[in-house]
Amino acid sequence: MNFFQVSKEQEKRLSQTEMNILEYVQSNLHVISSMNIRELALACFVSTATVFRFVKKLGYLGYRDFQSALKKAEDKVNSKGSFSTKNLNDYREEYLNNVTRSVQMIQNDQSDIFCHILGRYPRIFILASGLSAEIANYAYQILTICGFLVEFPKEQYQVEAIARKMKRDDVVLVFSHSGNSQEELEKIDTIFMIATPVIISFTKGEKNEIRSMSDLNFDFFSEQREFNHLDITSRCSMLAVFEVLVYQTIARNGIH
């Protein structure tokens, strides 16, 4: 069965919880094929029984049958440059859902820690590459306007030089869509060989290496997209999460 067609036909029969699962699956097609039912349940904050009922409601025989359909859907998406036959309303809803879910995922305790850390006015170092570097450039400008001392090293030799002057209370902000960017991982490794600053990362909402190396991580949701095998995935959810945290920090700490 065609996953996109089936999910579209069955949407009205799904509960809100099942719709959340569907949205997660649609946004993470490229990883679901390697996730077992327990891992998918954990990622969606539901029980395995809920995932199984969701799969059956879509008409699949079981989880393996569901995964097989997803693999075919992923291959079809990739063959089209990662774009399915959605209309404007579908893309608009997907976009808004991703941003909304990302902002809602921010936990109060995480936000409190972020505000506390930045409330000390630490030196901030930013790491990012690819399209995420555009969000990093924006973050650099916003934080500089707010009075922070910010540096954004783009080359490995610059990271090595900066790491030598880092202190324990300094903060490194890492922006990475996949959370597995080899370039960013090498930069973090370089820093850890010399210093032990606080690492705060913004990565896609799934297991990844940068998250595991961070003191504090913020998830965001965004559907993977490529064109001619090049990444054009939206970073707007990443940006929204960063902005919400910075605005709260400004309000709480009286930054002006």
Image (cartoon, grey):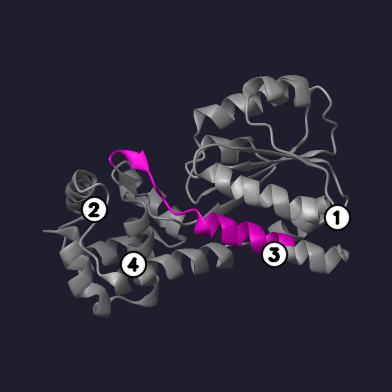
**How far is disc 3 from disc 2 in space, using C-alphas?**
34 Å
- Between disc 3 and disc 4, whose residue precedes? 4
Q: Position of residue 29 (x, y in %)?
A: 31, 50
Q: How many marks?
A: 4
Placement of the C terminus among the 4 image quadrants? bottom right
Question: Can residue 129 be spotted in the picture?
Answer: yes
Residue at 78% from the left image edge and 34% from the top image edge: 197
- Between disc 3 and disc 2, whose residue precedes? 2
Q: Which label is found at residue 91? A: 4
**How far is disc 1 from disc 4 in space, using C-alphas?**
38 Å
Circle 3 or circle 1, nearest the eye: 1
Residue at 28% from the left image edge and 44% from the top image edge: 33
Taking the magenta stretch, the answer to whether it contains residue 45 is no
Q: Which label is found at residue 63? A: 2
Find the magenta span and give its range.
228-246
Residue at 44% from the left image edge and 69% from the top image edge: 97
Question: Can residue 113 be spotted in the picture?
Answer: no
User: Which residue in the structure is indicated by mark 1?
Assistant: 119
Q: Residues within 10 Å of mark 1 (few under 14, many from 20)?
A: some
Q: Which residue type carries mark 4?
A: Tyr
Residue farthest left in this picture: 1
> Circle 1 sits in a helix, a strand or a loop, which is it?
loop
CB-based contact (under 8 Å), mark 2 and mark 4: no
**How far is disc 3 from disc 1 in space, using C-alphas?**
16 Å
